[in-house]
Amino acid sequence: MANKTDDKTLNILLFLCNWGAHAAFLTLQDQLRPIPHEIRMVRVPCAGRIDRAMLLKAFAQGADGVALVGCEPGTCRYGSGSANSLQNTDDVQRILDIMGLGRERLCFGAFLPEESEELLSFLQNFADEINVLGPAGIEAVPVISALNADDLHQELRQLVAAYDIHACQDCGKCTSACPLALIGKPFSPRAIASAVITGGIHSPGVQENVWSCLTCGLCYDRCPSAVNFPAFIKELRHLYRHTALPGQEVHGGFFHSLMRSMSSAAITPRRWGGLPDEIRTDPESPILFFGGCAPYYDIFFGKHSRPQTNKILIDSLRLLNFFDVAPRLLTDERCCGHDLLWSGDKKNFERLARINVERLNGLGIETVITTCPECYMTLHTTYADEGLELKFKVVHLYDFLEEQLDKGAVDFEPFDQVITFQDSCRLGRLEGKVDLPRKLLKRLQPARFVEMKEAAGASICCGNCAWTGCDGYSKALQVRRLEQAHATGSDLLVTSCPKCQLHLACAMEDPFRREQLEIELMDLTSIIAQTIRWKG
Ligand code: SF4
Ligand code: SF4
Ligand code: SF4
């Protein structure tokens, strides 16, 4: 057997169900049978309780292989444990494939109490396989690094000065615009800023609220003193990472583990598999299309909210092809890091950003086109703000399309739907492109286009930012948005950000209000791709 480990001991984590499989494992221990030394066992009440976040977190924290061992289907004490385990394993295996780690690093086995021999050979075979594969190579920077109280205080003072928090006139305009406050959450940006100044980051008013802010920018837009509260919150979250105070990562931190793993130079993602045959790409093109995390979302939310986020990427490529651009794709494309930065994990963000910029600069390309508003803002603005030098320009697909459409050679098939539009906070307020999607919407030929009550510059957020702090108020906000969409008489809610689609679709799953909230969701890119045609 070839062995890639040399002198490094690999780490294999075994999640072992407390019931049937554990009895088999005990037999092996009683008989002093040689369980592979790389294996560390964690006994769990049910393998089905080890969710996808925990499986992926094991890799993000340095596991080279993970074995999930439970009971034979039909023998689970809790009924659905084995089925859950199989489903979770399948989802994470698909994600590991795209991350470039390979599905082989995660396996599921089911054993009866008397199947100790079978369990032993399963473990030995898995350890052999991981030894052949070698280290997974993920070395994420630890998220929490403690600062002493004096340093923390000093950092906070600098932050308050850098973001001009003392310039606040206490006028209350931010609170009266903040969607969280308007939905009824006891939440006030100016009160948070004031609590930071008077009580530091440990004050309850800050701790409770720092993860809730949507960083949507409405308060900044309204503030007469130009206090950039969302950017202040971003830095405050980073400061929290220097304390033992808990963050509020939703979905068990699944997406944060994914992004942290991406910040390891050693992994080589395998993106862009399974594109439709008709899509034309060109490895020599000076134009690169940057996709973002949509393929991961489609897997993670596949059983829930009918996501179509990967379709947005394919339709983006279709549109580029329509205008005779066969773009280059980065087969080892990583996440842009947006959610790491906005959830306070600046260390891993910086690492990831440097890898991305070096990789893209090294290609000799002229232009990066992207559709995702978060990728756009991060590549276009944030990387430069962080001092990284880009040797290419970053263009949003809508800008490219608007330029092409202005030439006048194409129009759109009419379609018989009334449509309304959900703005992306990143593309609209934060990147100043409120009018751009509207120019495109006006070119389409729906039965009617009707704006929601709070639209354009006053648009409210889809209820979540950077996978942090999703709670009942986020849901209330999403419900309010969906009610506003229905109030326009529309039967199609057009989005411009994959996350808006996911979060709004999530709210529609409410079993008690589903029928009132349901509305068709489609991304603007997909509608354009579906209806565009050459004139004449
Ligand atoms: S809008 Fe600006 S000046 Fe007014 S209370 Fe809020 S942060 Fe202070
Ligand atoms: S960024 Fe948005 S959610 Fe956060 S305080 Fe400002 S208005 Fe409220
Ligand atoms: S709204 Fe739904 S999909 Fe979005 S973060 Fe909350 S639970 Fe997750």
Image: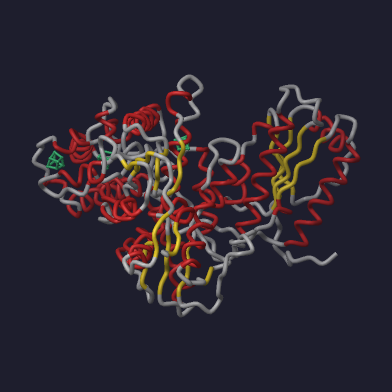
Say whether residue 506 is left or right of residue 271.
left
Q: What residue sits 47% from the left and 70% below the top?
A: 288
Quadrant in the rendering for residue 461: top left
Relative vertical location of residue 181 with respect to residue 318 in this rendering, above or below:
above
Q: Which residue is nearer to you in this view: 419 or 387? A: 419
Q: What residue sits 22% from the left and 33% below the top?
A: 188
Relative vertical location of residue 422 with respect to residue 430 in this rendering, above or below:
above
Q: Among all residues in the image, which is located at the extreme top?
A: 512
Q: Position of residue 486 (x, y in %)?
A: 36, 30
Q: How is the image coloured?
A: secondary structure
How many numbered badges does the structure rendering display?
0
Q: What residue sits 29% from the left and 27% below the top?
A: 183
Q: Which residue is nearer to you in this view: 166 or 284? A: 284
Quadrant in the rendering for residue 347: bottom left
Say whether residue 110 is left or right of residue 158.
right
Quadrant in the rendering for residue 504: top left
Q: What residue sits 71% from the left and 48% below the top?
A: 106
- The quarter of the rendering in which ligand 1 is drawn is top left
User: Which quarter of the rendering shows the C terminus?
Assistant: bottom left
Q: Which residue is nearer to you in this view: 405 or 221? A: 405
Q: Position of residue 365 (x, y in %)?
A: 45, 77
Relative vertical location of residue 81 with respect to residue 11 in this rendering, above or below:
above
Q: Position of residue 333 (x, y in %)?
A: 53, 64
Relative vertical location of residue 355 with respect to residue 500 in this rendering, above or below:
below
Q: Position of residue 363 (x, y in %)?
A: 49, 77
Say whether residue 193 is left or right of residue 525.
left
User: Which quarter of the rendering shows the N terminus?
Assistant: bottom right
